[in-house]
Image (spheres, rainbow, N blue to C red):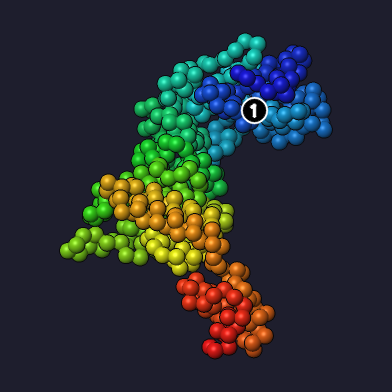
Amino acid sequence: MNIPQSIENMLKTLHDAGYAAYLVGGCVRDALLGLVPHDYDIATNAVPDEIIGLFGKKHCTFYGRAFGTVGVRQGGFAEITTFRTEGDYRDCRHPGVVKFADHVEEDLARRDFTCNAIAYDPRTGLLDPYHGADDLKNGILRAVGVPTARFREDALRIMRGMRFAAKFGMKPDMLTDAAMHACAYRLRQISAERVMTELCGMLTGKYIKEVLLAYPDVLGEWIPEILPCIAFSQHSTHHDHTVWEHTARAVGDAEPLLPVRMTLLLHDIAKPCCYRQDESGGHFKQHADRGAEMADSILHRLRCDNHLREQVVSLIRLHRGIPQDMPEVRRITGQIGAEGYRMLLMVLKADGGAKRSGVPESQEGIIHAEKLFQECRDRKLCCTIRELAVNGHDVAALGLQGKAIGAALHSVLEEVICDRLPNEKEAILRYLMRK
């Protein structure tokens, strides 16, 4: 491993004091995958008081005996944790008892997957009792020990496994895969915040399509609205996939931006409840508006932060069609901003690409919408009330009060957007005086 000097110095400090010390977990896994680790974890037989004594209180943050972890900042940062074993898990997430251990092998035995149960000592190399390096090389995700036992201890490990599969393209082995499905119901006891963190992590993964197709039942434990989509045929000339297959394809084909992929995960969530059929086929009228309402509820349930939730809800509501003219482009840009408009086109592009044969006419429409947006930006066209040549004080000076001021500004904005009124102060004031 190519270890930063600051981390090497921490290992050396522990070794020179007579303690065992290993890099463990994600930093070892990432290095074996040829990736640059973003953080470093060290496991040692030194207990927290001894760690603090070696590095000094001013460099240490002690997270408590329940964790046995000390954050050490000396040049770089690492979390140094005492070898430990764990008793029975009381809530599908936290062990009832944590005990310090003497040997690293005991510590590795409690970990979730073989790819995370590898230790590295620069002096002696890899310690890999569960053949995690081979599993990484072969793209296999395998639980340490008995998979059902690992997931009964901590159900969040199921979603962590899905995140690894989405990010690294690892495929769970047969026993691990079966246990992930069988133990999925235990995710109901995990906090929404933890589930949301793992969901966000997996959604931006390169292999998310395969994960969504393989584990909709697992996601359905927290998002049951997904379940009716799984085998729902769309009976449409535009679609040759079920709602869920289309969703998975759209998410996987989209740019790996969290708001875009979260939008696509939920963009057709209302189709089963909005479905109607006539002689021309299946229809999903109002599914964008209904889907926005359902997405808002789902993301509230998952304790999603307000900014992301509002972005996703707006994008779902607007995904009903491709902007076709400049006034529409300006209205949408005024609602969700330039960044939001760009993300909307990403959503529409992935949505259209996941339909039957990519629906080429939709891709042509997106190219046109991109050109209109660029023209709007180049010409610095007015899209919001803030960009009008008048403000509330100007309108109030004409004698309007309260809500009438806002209504007048919205009326002016629509006239300007439709090019029926120039965005010039005198012209706007004359328009308002005539009304």
- What percent of the width, then of the height, locates residue 380? 56, 62
Residue 216: quarter of image = top left
> Could you classify mark 1 by the number of other residues whose Cα lies within 10 Å: few (under 14), some (14-19), or many (20 or more)?
some
Q: Residue at left 39%, top 40%?
A: 209
Q: Position of residue 272 (x, y in %)?
A: 31, 57
Q: Position of residue 405 (x, y in %)?
A: 60, 81
Q: For residue 316, say whether it is visible.
A: no
Q: Nearer the viewer, residue 375 or 357?
A: 375
Residue at 51% from the left image edge and 47% from the top image edge:
258
The x and y percentages for residue 322 are 39, 59
Q: Which of the two residues, 372 or 348, is positioned nearer the viewer here?
A: 372
Q: Is residue 270 above or below residue 43?
A: below
- The total of numbered circles placed on residues is 1
The one of 17 and 390 positioned closer to us in this rendering: 390
Q: Quadrant of the N terminus?
A: top right
> Residue shown at 36%/44% (left/top)?
249
Of helix, strand and loop, which one carries label 1?
A: loop
Location of mark 1 (residue): 40
Identified by mark 1, the residue type is Tyr
Residue at the extreme left of the image, as rendered? 279
Residue 221 is left or right of residue 56, and the answer is left
At a point 64% along the width and 78% down the height, the residue shown is: 392
Q: Give above or below for 12 relative to 238.
A: above
Q: Is residue 48 left or right of residue 229?
A: right
Q: From the viewer's perspective, is residue 103 above or below residue 60? A: above
Examine the rendering and report whether any part of residue 23 can be seen. yes
